[in-house]
Amino acid sequence: MPELAFHRRRREAFLGRLDGPVALFAGGWRARNYPANPYSFRADSSFLYFFDRVEPNAAAFFDPADGTVRLFLEPRTPDDALWHGPMPGFEALQETQGVDEILPIGDLEDAVARLAAGRPVRSLAVAHEATTTRARKLTGEDLDFESAAGPGDPALVDLIFDLRVRKEPEELAEMRRAAAVTREAHLAAMAHTKPGGTEGYLNGIVDGCFARAGCVSAYPNILSVRGEVLHNHDHGNELRTGDLVLLDAGAERPTGYCADVTRTWPVDGNFSCEQAEVYEIVLAAEKASIEAARPGARYRDVHMVSARIIADGLVQMGVMKGSVDAILEAGAHAAFFPHGVGHMIGIDVHDMEGFGDRVHYPNGRERSTQFGTAFLRMDRDLEAGHVFTIEPGIYFVPAILHDPKLGEQFAPFIDQAAAERFLKANGGRGFGGIRIEDDVLCTADGPEVLTADIPKERKDVEAAVGTAG
Ligand code: GLY
Ligand code: MN
């Protein structure tokens, strides 16, 4: 856990750059079906950035006029103590949280009116609608969590983005801890992979590794032999010889900091010749994009490094045809690599993606409208302290290769007969997909892979499969 000093320092930096009061909200429980049966609570990420051990329905009021921070929490009641256990009192928490005052959340509106004394108060929408409604009423702002323009006033969003985007040593330490737990989970899933096993069993192994370390999944685990379904959350398949398991899973620490890692391995521990050939292209693309991820590099160019290697590799294999330059210009590589090369990572697995393209595509840059590259989630110039994923992949997707519009668009660049062989490979189940993903810290001395000790060389992956008793 980071020291209290870490959160206090963040709050002081925030107050030092604010020009008016701000109320932030943690959000609350969300019901699975009826109110008393909620999903696990997950606090808003910007709230987690400023506070440790965040409680549901917490709010905070930051006042730059006198440099104070007040927390608003649910009152401690005997009923709560009975059902959920006793909680530390406000006085004790004021000390451990290092804030100026703690007040009951029911007093928020009156207290903010008194403290703001007519000054406008800004806030951010959060992923809990009732809380956002409260923030809207409190501030008079038109806050909308789903808005593509971001969760609040652009100046406030920019300020919090700027604070969060370059990771400090304590944050990196948390991300390394998340990476270590993620390594355990990936190694355990590889070790327990056997023909006749099931995706569900491996998924339980991953969840168990996370839980054992006090972590949760930072996003629903993607664990499937149908890796060509990019965000495949189904775990219903049996594992059969010839299948590739694609695992995209990362641990999230109680502080919110997380990892996001993908590995792909053969169910029986042996890549076939064709699987090995595709794997080596993806691995070469991943390594080259990592190598290109240096301060000053534009992230879209890092994406295109992978796109070029994938296009070239598929031409060598006879799956694509034509010049690599022409393929890239037409965006035809996206027939097999239909997503972006990665995204920022931190307290959110796609860090601050909810802040919108205004921060992720700065300086008038706009998202490509081309199929595939349109899913590139950011296009910033990289700086030391940025942490992002690099995650190229090659997939044989019937929904792309048999799509009439895309099929026509990409026809000049695809050897359809070769593509069909991959779609029908593996006893008709199809080749599937291969993705390799690591979390990378940009430093002045070059890229540092935070998840480097999770095996990805083909021989190391093969050696890790099926070793559990
Ligand atoms: N790990 C899933 C994603 O990056 O979209
Ligand atoms: Mn990712």
Image: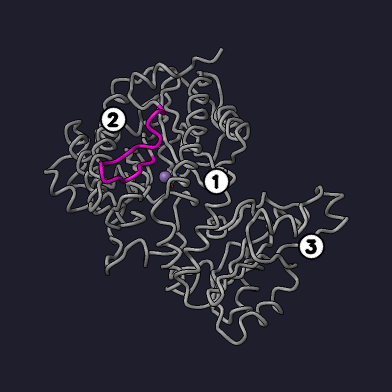
Look at the numbered disc 1 and give the secondary structure of its residue: loop
Q: Which of 282 and 41 is in front in this view?
A: 41
Region rendered in magenta: 439-454
Q: How far apart are marks 1 and 3 (CA)?
A: 26 Å
Residue type, numbered disc 1:
Pro
User: Distance from label 3 to label 2 (Cα)?
Assistant: 58 Å
Task: Name the residue that disc number 3 marks.
Answer: 75
> Residue 319 falls in which quadrant of the image?
top left
Which of the two discs, 1 and 3, sits closer to the camera?
1
Q: Is residue 142 left or right of residue 78?
A: left
The tag earlier along the polypeptide, 1 or 3, is 1
Q: Which corner quadrant of the image does residue 67 belong to?
A: bottom right
Tell me if residue 384 can be seen.
yes
Circle 3 Cα neighbour tier, 10 Å, few/some/many (<14 / 14–19 / ≥20): some
Q: Mark 1 points at which residue?
A: 2
Judging by the rendered image, the residue that carries numbered circle 2 is 278
- In the rendered image, residue 390, in percent from the top left (x then y), is placed at 34, 42
Residue found 33% across the figure and 24% down from its top: 457
Residue at the image position 50 percent from the left and 42 percent from the top: 174
Q: Which of marks 3 and 2 is nearer the N terminus?
A: 3
Residue 32 lies, with reference to residue 464, above or below; the image says below
Could you say where residue 222 lies in the image, as x and y percent from the top left?
Answer: 50, 39
Separation of marks 1 and 2 at Cα, in angstroms? 41 Å
Determine whether, in the image, residue 360 is placed left or right of residue 195: left
Colour mode of the rendering:
one colour
Is the CB atom of the residue marked by disc 1 within 8 angstroms of ligand 2's nearest atom?
Answer: no
Q: Is residue 121 magenta?
A: no
Three-letter amino acid code at the position of disc 2: Val
